[in-house]
Image (cartoon, rainbow, N blue to C red):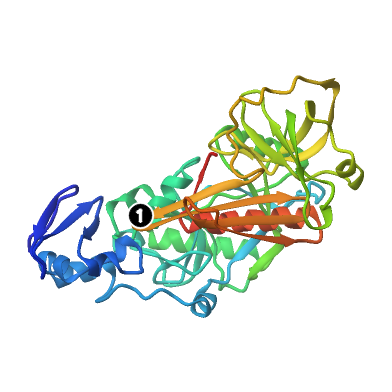
Amino acid sequence: MPDLDDGQSTEMQGSGSKPYTLKNVGGVYSCTCPAWRNQSVGIERRTCKHLRKLRGDAAEEARVGGDLPVKVKTAAEKETSVPPLLLAESWDNVTDPAGWWLSEKLDGVRAYWDGKQFWSRLGNLFHAPDWFTAGLPDIPLDGELWLDRKKFQRTVSIVRRQDKSDHWKEIRYVVFDAPKLEKDFETRFGFVRDCLAQHRPTYASAHDHEKCRGIDHLRGELQRLEALGAEGLMMRRPGSRYESGRSSTLLKVKSFHDAEARVVKHLAGAGRHKGRLGALMVELEDGTSFSVGTGFSDAERGNPPPVGSMISFRYQELSDGGVPRFPSYLGVRAEGNAPVPKESEPSRATTAGSRRFEFSEGKSDKFWEIAVSGTEVTVRYGRSGTAGQTNTKGFKDEAAAARHAEKLIEEKTEKGYSEVDG
């Protein structure tokens, strides 16, 4: 059958007077006919009678994974198909890490192998090529689809494709657990290593673990890996069992950094902070602006640092755009105030204090923003170019609010949303 090379297009006469244009762009086939354009699935999974006529039924069915585009799952169907993954809590800087198992926190995409195919933590299918999964055992495994450090967005763009392309050759499946083996972690991980050594899959390997010797070892290893561009560390409690949901037997460890910024504006609070400070809009020396909404006492919210003052804050890491993530207020800098920037100076912030993510695919062009202010998490979402909708949710403490925000961000990035600067 004829086919289109990458970047090639052709025309085919339909029922109308004007012919339809068929294209292949990076392995994603498209047609300008209404039947292709109006499908409610990802562009990689769309087909039509014109593409089938060009490429043949067998080729199109192999590309999209079936006779017809896959039906979008309902909320109830997604709920039943979500894999029972073990999820991590954050290390509290207090728990003694001695004896725990350390491993690098991979900046990839979590993937559950059910013995036949890969599933995301939200229950979405990853369409890996058969040659990629060759050699994987017919038992459930838990791991990460990973390309390299600081390559998260590239990884997402590959594993979300539904054309089973050769781009998967860049990816590795790094395995760190066997969920269905009802044994302690040491036994489960030993089983993973033995199983992969026996089957010898080309694109899969067991993740490296070592036993922590104490707090100095933990911090030294964290510093070493972060210097190499790693996201952080994971700690697994010795002798722990695999369980579904968040558990204190699995902890993620990231460094926090201290920095200073100038206060440029007070942002009004909402909910229980109504009538007092909600967050400080601050600016770094390079002009990057963002908000700091956690770490304040009630007294500090009632009498916040004045505009123009310099504050110290703590943050977890910088985004690709240089914006501190999860900043927390520490106090006013002892040296005093600094000049307020001119009104004409541009700001790179999005909606005050928020992080913005965007998703564009076919006719879908959406945004999603999230902001944490004290114990409240506010999200704004909708079509790009509109005001969107806003929802606010309260939590018992600031730590719970931050954890909830982090979870939402993970879910959005896994769905293909990419973070953007203001």
How many callouts does the rendering have? Answer: 1
Q: Percent from the top left, x then y, of residue 364? A: 40, 58
Q: Of residues 348 and 413, which is closer to you in this image?
A: 348
Does residue 183 sit above or below 4 in this rendering? below
Q: SS for tag 1?
A: loop
Residue depicted at 31% across the width and 61% down the height: 43
Q: Percent from the top left, x then y, of residue 258? A: 74, 32
Residue depicted at 58% across the width and 28% down the height: 346
Does residue 403 sit above or below 188 in this rendering? above
Instruction: Tell me if residue 129 can be seen.
Output: no
Taking the image as shown, residue 210 lies to the left or right of residue 1, namely right
**Which image quarter holds the N terminus?**
bottom left
Residue depicted at 10% across the width and 67% down the height: 14
Q: Of residues 204 and 304, which is closer to you in this image?
A: 304
Q: Of residues 323 and 36, which is closer to you in this image?
A: 36
**Which image quarter holds the C terminus?**
top right
Does residue 75 sit above or below 265 in this rendering? below
Instruction: Tell me if residue 247 can be seen.
Output: yes
Q: Percent from the top left, x then y, of residue 237? A: 71, 58
Taking the image as shown, residue 354 lies to the left or right of residue 112, namely right
Residue 181: image quadrant is: bottom right
Counting other residues with Cα less than 10 Å from the Cα at mark 1, is it few (<14), some (14-19), or many (20 or more)?
some
Q: Percent from the top left, x then y, of residue 318? A: 61, 36
Residue placed furthest toward the right? 299
What amino acid does circle 1 point to? Thr
Q: Which residue is mark 1?
A: 202
